[in-house]
Image: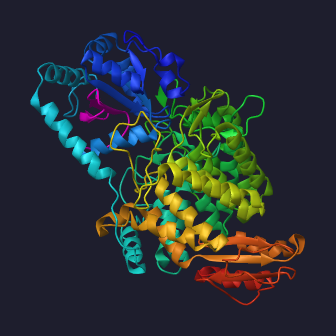
Amino acid sequence: MSSAANLLGAERSPYLLQHADNPVHWRPWGQAALDAARAANKPILLSIGYAACHWCHVMAHESFEDAATAAEMNEAFINVKVDREERPDIDHTYMSAIQAMGKQGGWPLTMFITPDGVPFWGGTYFPPTPRHGMPSFRQVLAAVRDAWAQGHESIAQNAKQMSAALAKMAASHPGPLPSPHMLGRVAASYIGMIDHSYGGLRGAPKFPNPPIFRFLWQEGARGEAAPAIEATHALLVAMSQGGIYDHLGGGYARYATDVEWLVPHFEKMLYDNAQILELLALAQAHRPDPLYAQRAEETVGWLMRDMMTGPEADPRVFAASEDADSEGEEGKFYVWTEAEIDALLGPGRAPAFKAAYDVTQAGNWEGHTILRRVTPPGDGAAETLLASSRTILFEARCGRIRPGRDDKVLADWNGLMIAALARASSVFGRLDWLELGQDCYEQLRGLLDGPDGRIQHAWRDGVVTAAGLLDDQACMARAALALFEASGQDRYLTEAIGLVRAAQAHFADADGSLFTSADDALDVPPPRPRTASDNATPAGQAVTAEVLARLCLLTGDPAWGAACEALICANSGGNERLSGVPGILAATRLLADGATVVVTGPAEDAADLVAVALASADPTVAVLRAPPGSALPADHPAFGKPTGDVAAYLCRARVCGVPIRSPIALLEALAVLPEAR
């Protein structure tokens, strides 16, 4: 394979294709690139990003499209591009290296590695000229080129240190099963970081941090951290009224750059919206609010309108993201001037809309306005007028040049959305959302199922583009369990178990932990990546622990509980680490205190009891149907209960309570939160 060419044109990733016309001789990641570097005795310049990344676009325009810069790159390096969403395992390794160097991670990630894949120096974005104490990208290139050519001992020393650091970071951290006291300490620590003025965690930039707030909500739902419930409500309201939310088209941006949730990085990610939708459903189940219902409906509307992709003749799965930029400018698609608002809405509508959405002549961001709701809800007539104004602006915005869309299909992110749709369907009473999740699940299995029971990671344009990772098996198993509980169809439980078995066969270590990459992944440099730390998405090990705990609740099989406990204990060492693994801690609480609502009787007669159980605000509640003639698992504490009568049995700690026959009584039994009683 020639090194004197840009080889990205044959790739499927939208991010890689964005760079296919660069004068840089880019290669995709793979053994061929490592072999080429070894043959040429050149270091690899590894650049990692994603299609919706604003600063990735900036560095591309400034440096990778510049002929002189490209010539220096081509002369001294083997240049490799990686889509972090397509290869999160590769991204994880080199992002860990940046952090081991004591630097703040981010994208674009710029890493220099040996032909064996060992990192020795790196950074993130580098400007084209020295700026703010940062060297220019060409200065960096020259320094690394000269050090390599001179055989500088610092490179070998750095590579050795990085190998040791990565091996340490990829090791499991065994410890005891976290106690309720430890869970409470972590929850209290997070609560101490809450921004009581603006919601979310203190400081800027502001991220939604769904794994943290999902853990906090669960602790609050179990009555262990009551302030966590209010903190989650405050987060959802602040985001839902702030500029991070698209008030015309629906959906939440990735994060806000300021403390007030006003100025987003405008890209919209599937994974954020999935996790926020689930939080909206939990919050609605606890304290119904028209705001939550509206945001959920609008977000699913955005999902169906703008994110549906898949085979051209029958698209039923969801794209990865929408870009921040259009026409080369961040946010241009989304922002407004007062003159535009006045012209479109006229004197009868504009004043009320401007007052409600912070529209002024000066604007609230760089001379433009990012829409945010700054007034409380009005009466029915006022809200109807505002809704019609939003429709006018939305239709006008449709005439603008849209941001790019990354339409690759990722199993793990789609799995998060399927589970969210299942829960939201039950809480908001939208059967069509459950059907949407089921359709997505079916098509994903058709596109990404592997011959050995594993599900692959990425698909685009008719081709599987990346092998399955732990996160894919875990998130799709979690989705299957959510569909099983919401629909009562046994096959989803069977398929969830199949995915867990595949994960155990190909990702497990002897200590009960799980690697990110499979045992047959040939292009992953050592050490084999493994993490339990949650980031913007929950870690694959954390999701697997949740699935194992839920399988224990649903089947009663203690083997699932033992596997869950082993996985948790393989990642619980060191009290200082526990705050970084909220997903593992949530699984710990689920395993220890989770409940199963077993609903017996004919489906039609038991429907109200099932609906109450599924709409619980407590995410540690699992729902199991037992229609007449069915056989409950022999290991389940409800085994032997009569299935012909309409009743609900609340089973906790392997003990089932008396039959509950009234939906109101079941609601009362499940209402562990004071406000929900």
Q: In which quarter of the image is the N terminus?
A: top left
For the question of whether residue 420 can be seen, the reply is: no
46 horizontally vs 321: left or right: left
**Residue 419 at x, y percent in the picture:** 64, 56
Q: Residue at x 32, y 63 (%)?
A: 577
Along the line of sight, the residue nearer the viewer: 66 or 27: 27
Q: In this view, does 501 lie above or below 342?
A: below
Query: Over which residues does the magenta segment extend?
Result: 102-126
Along the line of sight, the residue nearer the viewer: 102 or 448: 448
In the rendered view, how is the structure colored? Answer: rainbow
Residue 112 is one of the magenta-drawn residues: yes
412 horizontally vs 646: left or right: left
Along the line of sight, the residue nearer the viewer: 47 or 644: 644
The image quadrant that residue 118 belongs to is top left
Along the line of sight, the residue nearer the viewer: 331 or 209: 209
Majority secondary structure of magenta residues: loop
**Residue 120 at x, y percent in the picture:** 22, 34
Q: Quadrant of the C terminus?
A: bottom right
153 horizontally vs 23: left or right: left
Residue 83 is one of the magenta-drawn residues: no
Q: Which residue is farthest bottom?
A: 658
Q: Which residue is drawn at 68% across and 32% down?
A: 396
Q: Residue at x 53, y 18 (%)?
A: 10
The image quadrant that residue 14 belongs to is top right
**Residue 507 at x, y percent in the picture:** 48, 50
160 horizontally vs 18: left or right: left
**Residue 150 at x, y percent in the picture:** 11, 20
The image quadrant that residue 613 belongs to is bottom right
For the question of whether residue 86 can be seen, the reply is: yes
